[in-house]
Amino acid sequence: MKNIYFILISLMAIIYVVYEVRKKRFSVKESFWWVIASIIMLILSIFPYSIDRVANFLNIDYSPSLLFVICIIFLLFINFKNSKMISEHQEKIVELAQHIALLEAEVKGMKGKK
Amino acid sequence: MKKDKVLFVIPAYNEEENIGKVLKEIKKDAPFADILVINDCSKDYTEKIVEIEKVPCISEVFNLKYAMAVQTGIKYASQNDYDYVIQFDADGQHIAKEAIRLLDTMKKENCDIVIGSRYLEDTGYPCPFFRRMGTRFFSYIIWITCKQKIADPLSGFQCLNKKVIHRYSKMGNYPEFPDANLVIEMLLLGYEIKEIPVKMKLREVGVSMHGGIIKPIKYMINMFYAIVFIMIQNPRKRRK
């Protein structure tokens, strides 16, 4: 059992993600892809030859390269999602700041009238 | 005895065709209650129509989606010390007279949440096959996890009491779709939930928020995932 270490690592990954969600430091919605990724990691570490079979099916000669491709695609996907979210949040923060400034002006005007 | 303060929370997004009629109906059938419309950054004249009807209206700064709009209303109710909140839809599906029945059930049975259900009795509400399947599936999950039958956990027609208002208003992680997952969480935390059959009207004009093919599938997956986490977060408290 050489792959016991990898099974342990992927189990730790799952437990860590679930633990963070339980402590409410990580939202359920955001954790979705990380849980999926760590489950795939677990499956691959229990059945290491499954990656060879998938590589065979896809006509890839060197099966570890498939692993790297999957990893890179996953990381790019997460990164893109995060970038998208950052720009959405930026927009919302600007809108909120402007709204607060307008409200403050209104409140000051109301105080002045008194 | 002090009179109970009741608030109708109506989240509205692009509902200019329906909202006027809905507000008139509530004013006629439930004159004792206050109404609050949460305008979720509509692009049409929803806000103007609400102003013409002289109903208080909160406008969100940007579109927050249905659930967050409802939570805004619940926070308002909590701040202004309301005893009961009735979640009501702006699209004219819900009937104000049925809302009074929800309220009466709540007072009589002394429970925390009353859900108005379409499927508890055959009320003649036509429903797309897919949605019906989804509802069955989630009510089955609720049955497994909490041993209680809730026929229509996806119903947005609910009545909440003060305890629940307080809890919802303090929830930092109020879910994006507060349906089966919220029902399960509240049941696991020991809140009483009752369900009564209500009549509903068909949607007259406008678009539903659960449309298309990909959205419902995404919704199902997200909901299932959220339920799994709720099961992990809340230790089981099975009742006999």
Image (tube, rainbow, N blue to C red):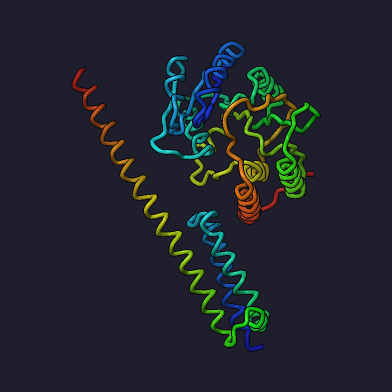
- Quadrant that contains the C terminus of chain B: top right
Q: Is residue B71 left or right of residue B200?
A: left
When asked about the image quadrant of residue A100, the answer is top left
Q: Nearer the viewer, residue B158 or B237?
A: B158
Q: Is residue A99 visible?
A: yes
Q: Could you tell me how many numbered marks the image carries?
A: 0
Q: Quadrant of residue B228?
A: bottom right
| Image side of residue B135 versus residue B37, left or right | right
x and y percentages locating residue B11 in the rendered image: 52, 30
Q: Quadrant of the N terminus of chain B?
A: top right
Q: Is residue B3 visible?
A: no
Give me the residue at 53% from left, 27% from top. Answer: B10
Quadrant in the picture for residue A79: bottom left
The residue furthest left is A112
> What residue sits 59% from the left and 87% below the top?
A61
Task: Name the one closer to the observer, B135 or B81.
Answer: B135
| Residue B36, percent from left and from top | 49, 23
Residue B133 percent across, percent down from the top left: 75, 44
| Left or right relative to B176: residue B107 | right
Measuring 54% from the left and 54% from the top, which residue is drawn there? A29
On the image, the x and y values in percent for residue B15 come to 52, 27
Nearer-the-camera pick, A91 or B97: A91
Question: Residue at (72%, 42%) from the top-left corner?
Answer: B135
